[in-house]
Image: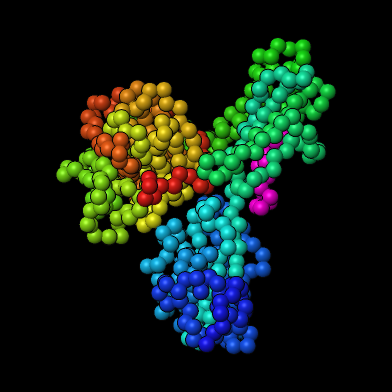
Amino acid sequence: AAAAPTAAGGGSGRWPSSAAAALAPPNPPSPGLLRGPSSAHFTVTGPDHPITASLAGEAVLPCHLSPKMSAENMEVRWFRSEFSAIVHLYRDGQDQYGQQMPEYRGRTELWKDDITNGRVSLRIRDIQLSDGGQYKCFFKSSVSYEEALLELQVAGLGSAPVISVEGHQDGGIRVVCRSAGWYPQPKAQWRDLQGQLLPSASESISQESNGLFQAEIAIVITEESNQKVSCCVRNPHLNQERESAISIAELFFPQVNPWMVALGVILAVLLPLAGYCFWRQHRAKAPAPSTDSVTLSPVDVTLDPDTANPKLVLSEDQKRVRRGDTCQDLPDNPERFDHCYCVLGAQGFTGGRHYWEVEVGHKMRWDLGVCRESVSRKGPVTYTPRNGYWVVWLRGGEYAASTYPRTPLPVSIRPNRVGIFLDYEVGEVSFYNVTDRSHLFTFTETFSGTLRPYFHPCRSGKNVAPLIICPVPVEDSLHLEVFKPQFEDFDNSGIGEGFVTGVGG
């Protein structure tokens, strides 16, 4: 019989504490199995250094048996702090997903190409902040078991620094640099043309509600000092940085009025940016059509009940959806969302222009947009274009778009109805406030596959009003041309954390 449990670690000789603490789950290591140098038939080895992965990217965690032997008929279990906290389970010659933690559903894959030599790797997609930490790779044969400890470090590369001028200070010009979306805490610095560090007037690194960090660093540029400087924000884990530069001409210093200083700096920043955007737009595609040549194409969108979460209540005409109080007894088919309280439109789009409107009324929370038909329907949903979601939402009185980092939307008049325009070939999803006929936001993307309308009525309580798909007469849609913007050459495809919604969404 095995000895009493001790702390986990490959070849420790006795029960791993993680396994011993989880005797309740099905098939824990049997007390009759042996472990340790004197009795085990193999050891498990993983990397001797932490593995680093980028937010919204993927990580590969390898481990292998020594000596080489086939693990085809073994149990291979990846778990976190508790033996029952299963990240991925391979047993009886196949992957088992029934006991997998919900936050990993649809995101893991066990690479078994070399399993006959005892080598496997766990692939985790769409990396999130919560994925960081320790993992254990556990092998169990019919006579013994072993495990290895691995560490995953999650890192996020933030946005390009934005430099702004904020007036005069100490006989010079105060310039501030800001960048968001970093993890872990970044390092921010000012540099001169030779790459030498410059002293900062102030520096602030703060953590946002989503767990990511924002950097703000200021410098006072004087006529005698360096008049061309760069702001550099660096992620030490990824060993990558983002940098922006600014140059201020001599004539904009003390003898000139403050408004001329601001004008000079603005021109120094905007003129190169405008030139770059002009070059990029004309290199990538032909000139965009003017607003009066764009015609919206109303489409009769209905809801697809086979995709609706069991807690959603759909009207008979499939035009209204609200969050119900109880979970309906519906088949758990592959198309149905099981965690996110959302539903897709029945129509799929593989080309063309399509426009529809949704009445949001006085709802305090809602999510609307477009998603790929191929998105995972099981487990929590993360709103980013990389994950196949182009969504605008309302939360706590604030509107935002699901870019990375998310983009706050300035809304002067609360929309009672939201218009959504998909131009598949051009690669745009645009949102409009139909109430005051204003443009809210436009995503740009190169689409492939089928896209479908996306609806999320959010929590009930005081938010019980339904989302209503409204008819759009052709004559009304033509009038919407006046606020269709020129195509924006702005890449907001998104690489990161986004907005996560699930059971509580």
Q: Main secondary structure of the magenta part?
A: strand
Q: In this view, which residue lies farthest toward the right?
A: 224
Query: Going 45% across and 31% down the picture, which residue do you hit?
Result: 409
Q: Pinpoint residue 33: horizontal percent, then vertical percent.
A: 51, 85
Is 176 positioned to the left or the right of 317 in the image? right
Is 115 positioned to the left or the right of 336 in the image? right
Q: Pinpoint residue 93: horizontal percent, then vertical percent.
A: 42, 79
Residue range corresponding to the magenta coloring = 230-243
Is 105 positioned to the left or the right of 167 in the image? left
Vertical relation: 73 (above or below) 204: below
Is 216 positioned to the left or the right of 408 in the image? right
Q: Pinpoint residue 193: horizontal percent, then vertical percent.
A: 78, 35
Q: Is residue 111 magenta?
A: no
Q: Is residue 242 magenta?
A: yes
Query: Going 44% across and 35% down the picture, which residue do you hit?
Result: 400
Q: Pinpoint residue 307: horizontal percent, then vertical percent.
A: 28, 52
Vertical relation: 275 (above or below) 210: above
Q: How many marks?
A: 0
